[in-house]
Amino acid sequence: MLRTLLLSLLITCVSAGEAVRQLPPGWLGANANLGRATWNAPGMAEQLASLGLGTLRYPGGTVGNYWAWRDGWVSFGGEAALGHITTMARQRPPRPANTPQQFVQAIAADPASGVWMLNLVTADLADQLAMLRTAQTAGAVIRRVELGNELYFALPENRAVHPTAADYAREAGHWAAAIRAEFPAARCAALAHGKVEDADAPERKR
C-alpha cells in the first residue's frame, strides 16, 4: 500500500501556481552498485518488476569508471584516489560477478529499461561498444546511454584522461556518434556540472 502511494505521488508532479503535468514514462529510476549479490540471483527479476521502476542503471555510479564488464567487477591496476575502488579491485574470488548478460536477466520484464553507464576512464570506445553489443545479443534494447559518471571530480584518473571539460566534450561527442551509428534508438547523456553549490540558487535551478 505504501509503495503504491509513493509511486502515485512521484508520477504526478504538482507545483504551486502551475498546471498539473504528467511525468514521462521511465522517469522513476534506480541505481545499485551490487557488491554482495548478483543481478540474476533467484527472485531478483521479480522483485525489481514489483517496484514499478522505469529505468535501472548498470553498472552503477563511479564504480562504472573502473568497470571490467567481462569480469562483472571493478578492475584497476594502481591506487585509485577513491579508496573503495582500490578495495573492490583487490577483492579476489569468490565474489559476486555482475556481467551485462546477468543484468539483462534482471530487466527481462522491460528490456529497454536499462541505463548503460559507460566507462570513459579505464576503457576505450571499442571495448564499450562490445559491451553494448553483448547486452543487445542477450536481449537488451539499447535506448539510454550515459557517458561516464562524476568525471568533474578532481581525481588523478579523471584528469589523466580528460584534463579539461573541452577534452571530455570532444571525446563524448565522438563516442555518441559511434554509439548512435550502431544503436540508432540510443539517446546519449553527457555530463555537466556547474560551480554553484547552493541547491536553491537560481543559477543552479536554471
Image (tube, rainbow, N blue to C red):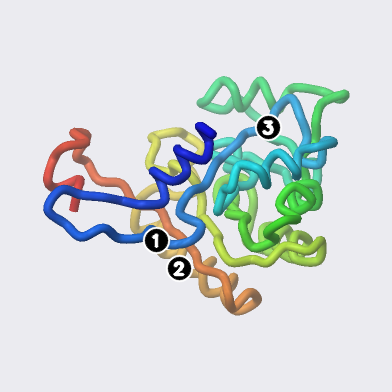
Q: Mark 3 = which residue?
A: 34
- In the image, is 105 to the left or to the right of 129? right
Residue at x 60%, y 36% (from the top left corner)? 32
Q: Do the residues labelled 1 and 2 touch (CB within 8 Å)?
A: yes
Q: Is the residue 173 above or below the residue 161 in the image?
A: below
**Mark 3 surroundings: few (<14), some (14-19) or many (≥20) residues within 10 A:** some
Q: Residue at x 44, y 41 (%)?
A: 150
| Residue 79: quadrant of the picture | top right
* Closest to the observer, 116 or 106: 106
Q: Which amino acid does label 2 sit on?
A: Gly
Mark 2: secondary structure: helix
Q: In this view, does 53 lie to the left or right of 45?
A: left
Label 3 – label 1 distance at C-alpha: 29 Å
Q: What residue type is labelled 1?
A: Ala
Q: In which quarter of the image is residue 71?
A: top right
- Of marks 2 and 3, which one's residue comes earlier in the chain? 3
Residue 89 relative to residue 92: left or right? left
Disc marking residue 103:
none
**Residue at x 16% of width, y 37% of height:** 200
Determine which of the numbered discs, if any, sits on residue 173 in the image.
Answer: 2
Measuring from the top left, give residue 6's x and y in whole percent: 45, 38
Query: Along the line of sight, which residue is nearer the eye, 33 or 155?
Result: 33
Label 2 to label 3: alpha-carbon separation: 30 Å
